[in-house]
Image (spheres, helix red, strand yellow):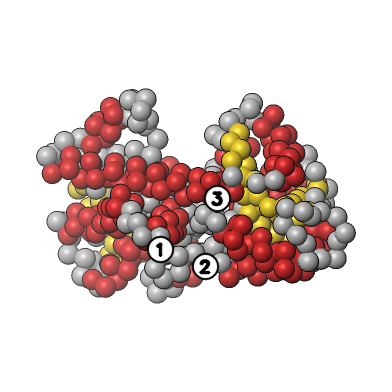
Amino acid sequence: MRISIVGSGYVGTTIAACFADVGHDVVNIDIDEGIVASLNDGQSPIHEPGLDELVAEHAGEGLRATTDYAAVTDTEVTFLALPTPAEDGGHIDLSVTKSGARSLGAALGESDTDHVVVTKSTVVPTTTEGTIAPIVAEESGMSVGDDLHVGMNPEFLREGSAVSDFLGPDKVVLGAETDRAREALRGVFDPLVERASDPPVIETGIAEAEMIKYANNGFLAAKISLANDIANVCREYDVDSEAVLSAIGLDHRIESEFLGAGVGWGGSCFPKDVAAIIAAARGVGYEPMMLEAAVEVNDRQPVRLLDRLREYVDPAGARVAVLGLAFKPGTDDIRNSRAIPLVEALSEAGSDIVGYDPVATDNFHGRYPDIDYADSAAAALDGADAALVVTDWPEFADLNGEFDAMATPVVVDGRRIVTRREGIVYESLV
């Protein structure tokens, strides 16, 4: 099929390359000329394992990019993959999505064929039908359900494994209200489903598809926070939380994934999506107490990590190495990284901070230019009075003799990845 994707960010670039890889003819539309040039040169604009190879393989053939919205008129289906960042109070900011919908509608107004528009962005229930579709219809002069059909296809991509997540999904959710939209979505995803050995395909209404994304992330965020809460209780009783959580993860009703206790969750999805569904629920008169508690526990974890540090080192004037600046391993994304509240608290306490991350240093430096940065974990540890392990990069599990270069070898591990050894004072968060 001929597919256009509006937006070449994290989601848009990933799905464009993956759609091309399963045989579709894909055009990415973005207002950033630099991103467009990069994609056409076969280079991914974002750091994501496996994505560089797909973009390089398909650029100029099944995948191209442009700044011209008129390209949508040569396609059958358009996916809107535009950012919906959080506003104050948790509500999503739809300004970029609305702008994209207007530009899309204006371009479709020059076409004399019907078109299917699919929301890929994460939006609260009723947004696609109540906000996006009317904008496209007004700008294009088309009629929803007649020559303009809309759908919703939520994404479940984890940064660091987005390509494999998309090409080997746990499920595919197709939200539509008309046969035309449903058939188009099937046509888009049938090659992927066949290649991925027939994962479950859920065909549902548009609002249900919108809600599934929030419910999915809300549940996972709450599961992590519950694991952290249990681990915090274990610590007070001097009980090995890892043994406890590993055991309960064997229960098929619970499962082991997302039970890794630590300094908490971050990133672009969980914080924004949980805040958005909380705000949306309050807007209709419901107080989502479980989701609110998940956020409260998560916000408390970095504070607890600093409390462990203060048991051994006064942060005022101390040189503290912060190991891991990305919100998770495998990505350079620092959005809502747990390193952010820690660096801010250490700065407020008067610490001399040195940060290190295998790939996210440049992004973190852009936000915090006044702290020191090292080009290796060993360099960050050299002369440090303490080290905080914030992101569970595999290389941190291999650290050993590097701790000997610390002024005082105090290691507070927020991810339980460093091996406890003689010669260092080791504290895990949980």
Task: Choose top left, top right, bottom left or bottom right for residue 372.
Answer: bottom left
Left or right position of 216 against 8: left
**For the image shown, how many numbered marks are present on the structure?**
3
User: Where is residue 258 drawn, in percent x and y?
Assistant: 38, 39
Q: Is residue 317 above or below residue 210?
A: below
Which mark's residue is nearer the viewer, 1 or 2?
1
Residue in the picture at 80% in, 50% down: 76
Residue in the picture at 71% in, 64% down: 136
Q: Residues within 10 Å of mark 2 (few under 14, many from 20)?
A: some
Left or right position of 196 against 394: right
Which mark's residue is nearer the viewer, 3 or 2?
3
Q: Nearer the viewer, residue 58 or 247?
A: 247
Q: Is residue 290 above or below residue 350?
A: above
Residue 283's disc number: 1
Q: Which residue is mark 2?
A: 93
Are the two marked residues, 1 and 2, in contact with CB atoms closer than 8 angstroms?
no
User: Where is residue 91 drawn, in percent x and y?
Assistant: 45, 65
Q: Which residue is mark 3?
A: 207
Residue in the picture at 41% in, 48% down: 218
User: Where is residue 246 drawn, in percent x and y?
Assistant: 30, 30
